[in-house]
Each structure stands twice: as structure tokens, then as C-alpha cells.
Image (cartoon, rainbow, N blue to C red):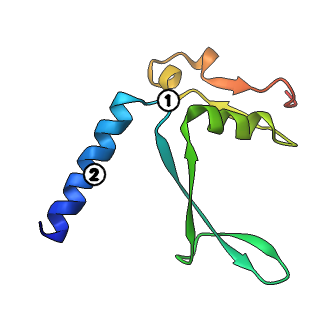
Amino acid sequence: MTRPAVKRLAWYLRCLADRIDPDGAPRGMSYSFTFEDREGIRFRDDGKRCPMWYLGRDSYDRAHAEADRPGVRVDWGALARGDREHAVIHWPEAPP
């Protein structure tokens, strides 16, 4: 198989896995990180990186729920339906 064919097959299988288990599928983020001497982890957006992923909706929700200062979240499905009242989710600990 050629490299483009392998990439196309991998993309197809990734899409198929997301459809089979949308809540448990791994999701890639646009953020990345590097380990820096005497600094620890540095979040990057300059191309140097180890990409960040989270496993499913439960991990994503946990990242919000266990935050020291949780913010608001957007329910994109409700927003797409035009339901603005339920589109913004405030976490219980978040300030109004």
C-alpha cells in the first residue's frame, strides 16, 4: 500500500471508530506540550510538541469538573438547534 492509501485507510477507520463509540473515542486537541528543564510542562502552539489527547467524553467532563476555576461550556448541539437557553452550561462551582 502506498503512504497516501494508508493515511486514507487510517482516516476512514478513525471515523468508523468514532461512529461506533462516540462517547469513548479518543479525541485529539489542538494543544500540545513539551517537557522543559526547570520549568516542567510547557503548553505549545509553535509546532514543537507532543499532541494532547483525551479518552472520551467522561475524561473531558472530568477535566472541567475537577478544575480549580471551572468556566462555562457550550452545548454545540443545542446551539445548532437554536436552543440558546440550554446552550451554555455553567458548572456548579463556576461563578455566574
- SS for dot 2: helix
Circle number at residue 76: none
Q: Is residue 47 above or below residue 31?
A: below
Q: Which quadrant of the view contains residue 19?
A: top left
Report the residue at 56% width, 42% height from top: 55
Task: Judge left or right: residue 21 versus residue 15.
Answer: right
Amino acid beneath label 1: Asp
Report the residue at 20% width, 56% height from top: 8
Task: Judge left or right: residue 38 versus residue 62.
Answer: right
Amino acid beneath label 2: Trp
Q: Is residue 94 above or below residue 10?
A: above
Most foreground residue, 39 or 90: 39
Residue 92, position as x, y percentages in the image = 83, 23
Question: Furthest-front residue in view?
Answer: 1
Most foreground residue, 53 or 45: 53
Report the residue at 72% width, 71% height from top: 42
Q: Which quadrant of the view contains residue 64?
A: top right
Q: Earlier in the sequence, mark 2 or mark 1?
A: 2
Task: Judge left or right: residue 54 versus residue 81.
Answer: right
Task: Judge left or right: residue 70 versus residue 75.
Answer: right
Report the residue at 49% width, 44% height from top: 26
Residue 35, position as x, y percentages in the image = 71, 76
Q: Which residue is mark 2?
A: 11
Q: Which residue is mark 1?
A: 23
Q: Quadrant of the N terminus?
A: bottom left
